[in-house]
């Protein structure tokens, strides 16, 4: 019997402990407060928002698939905003209605796609704020992978603040298996190469 060698698992992007050595305690506590606030906002509030917003990237079509399922089952939603992806990513694909139809999109009225690629989360956030203001959106849910949620939420919040925009924003994390590899990197968003999670001990 021939053995099959497996390529080594890629490690996720993590911040090493030494990177926090010079961070003042008050700044570190402010980050922890922000993380706690974002992660404890009630997800059920997303059932009453005006728009779903999906910042795409990392080849994570599961963000789009979850948002499309919610969009198709939520007839009171008026808008589905989909921010573009960085064209420098290996998994980059143009954002088109045909691509979204392939993921189950049927209702296209109210769907707005970012025409130009976005090279970073900040550009996505500024586009989101411009669309929210221009379309008169009064509340939104951010649909993104859990391990990216706090960063996206705070970046969009900052863009809202910079733009003088106040709008209720609900985090709506996508369901992702803890050991699912992120398509762009091959690494898990949660694990550090320790293998699949097992329920047995």
Image: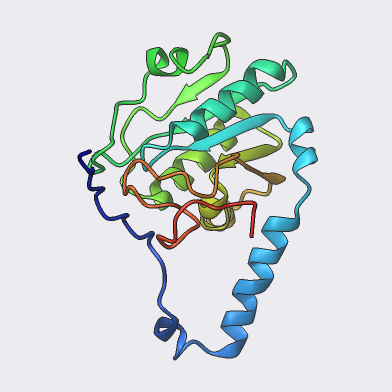
Tell me the quarter of the picture where residue 201 sits. Answer: bottom right
Instruction: State the image coordinates of residue 12 (x, y, percent, origin top left).
Output: 38, 59
Residue drawn at 51 percent across, 39 percent down: 128
Seen in the image, is 35 located left or right of residue 5? right
Tell me the quarter of the picture where residue 31 sits. Answer: bottom right
Instruction: State the image coordinates of residue 8 (x, y, percent, origin top left).
Output: 27, 55
Q: Is residue 39 visible to the viewer in this orientation of the structure? A: yes
Q: Is residue 163 visible to the viewer in this orientation of the structure? A: no
Total labels: the figure holds: 0
Instruction: State the image coordinates of residue 30 (x, y, percent, origin top left).
Output: 63, 76
Seen in the image, is 121 located left or right of residue 39? left
Tell me: residue 18, above or below residue 91: below
Instruction: State the image coordinates of residue 47 (x, y, percent, origin top left).
Output: 77, 31
Tell me: residue 157, above or below residue 23: above
Residue drawn at 52 percent across, 14 percent down: 104
Seen from the viewer's position, the closer of residues 161 and 97 is 97
Residue drawn at 55 percent across, 43 percent down: 177
């Amino acid at each position: 019997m021939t053995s099959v060698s497996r390529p080594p698992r890629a490690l996720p992007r993590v911040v090493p402990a030494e990177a926090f050595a010079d961070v003042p305690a008050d700044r570190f506590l402010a980050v922890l407060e922000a993380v706690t606030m974002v992660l404890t906002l009630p997800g059920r509030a997303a059932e009453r928002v005006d728009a779903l917003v999906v910042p795409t990237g990392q080849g994570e079509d599961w963000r789009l698939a979850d948002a499309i399922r919610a969009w198709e089952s939520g007839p009171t939603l008026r808008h589905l905003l989909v921010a573009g992806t960085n064209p420098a990513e290996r998994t980059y694909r143009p954002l088109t209605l045909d691509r979204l139809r392939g993921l189950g999109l049927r209702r296209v009225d109210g769907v707005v796609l970012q025409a130009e690629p976005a090279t970073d989360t900040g550009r996505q956030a500024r586009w989101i704020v411009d669309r929210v203001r221009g379309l008169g959106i009064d509340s939104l849910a951010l649909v993104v992978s859990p391990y990216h949620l706090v960063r996206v939420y705070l970046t969009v919040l900052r863009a809202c603040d910079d733009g003088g925009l106040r709008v209720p924003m609900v985090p709506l994390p996508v369901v992702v298996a803890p050991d699912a590899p992120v398509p762009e990197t091959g690494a898990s968003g949660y694990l550090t190469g320790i293998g699949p999670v097992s329920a047995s001990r």
